[in-house]
Amino acid sequence: MLSKAIQIAAYWHAGQVDKSGAPYILHPLRVMMSVEGETDKIVAVLHDVLEDTELTADDLRAHKFSSEIREAVQALTRQTGEDYFDFIARIIPNPIARRVKLADIADNLSPARSSGLNMKLEARYQRARHILLGTLKPQSESAPNPLQEQNANIGKEGK
């Protein structure tokens, strides 16, 4: 099933490029390579197909992917208009989706890719990472970012 997932992702991401102009498929492939186990690898390579292409959850079912895989991919699909941190909170109960999203964020924050990120997006990824790791409570995107507040107070102690 992993080879089928790679073929599907390559087909549906064909022609897409990332912010640096590299073929987009390289991102899901890197995420796939950074997780363990076949199920996690399948979900990782498919993690953006429902959000960024015309492929549907019904198509995944037709390709005979298990309900476990389909549910994880759907959990990793941000709905139109969905607050980013509501999306992150929705991932938490699904352990496969949580592991894959952490790998996705790690790839997005890797030095090779993060050089093109603006500080706001980088802060959003860092906050999402902490939420998924359980070190921050999920809150909507409009809520204050405790990580930014903490960083703003560094060096102010004792003044």
Image (tube, grey):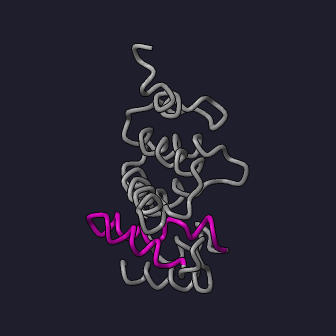
Residue 6: percent from left, percent from top: 43, 81
> Chief secondary structure of the magenta span?
helix
Residue extending farthest to the top is 158
Along the line of sight, which residue is nearer the eye, 73 or 48?
Answer: 48
Q: Give the quadrant of the N terminus.
A: bottom left
Identify the residue shown where x is 54% and y is 82%. Answer: 23
Most foreground residue, 95 or 15: 15
Q: Position of residue 155 (x, y in %)?
A: 42, 26
Measured as percent of width and height from the top left, residue 27 is found at 47, 72
Name which residue lies at 52% across and 40% down. 89
- Which part of the image, by quadrant, shows the C terminus? top left
- Residue extending furthest left? 36
Residue 11, how many percent across, how many down?
A: 55, 86
Q: What stretch of residues is rendered in magenta?
A: 24-53
- Is residue 6 placed above or below 90 in the rendered structure? below
How many numbered discs?
A: 0
Q: Verify whether residue 29 appears in magenta.
A: yes
Q: Nearer the viewer, residue 140 or 113?
A: 113
Q: Residue at x 47, y 32 (%)?
A: 151
Along the line of sight, which residue is nearer the eye, 40 or 20? 20
- Specify the quadrant of the image occupied by residue 80: bottom right
Q: Residue furthest right?
A: 81
Residue at 48% x, 33% y is 147
Q: Is residue 74 magenta?
A: no
- Farthest residue in the front direction? 159
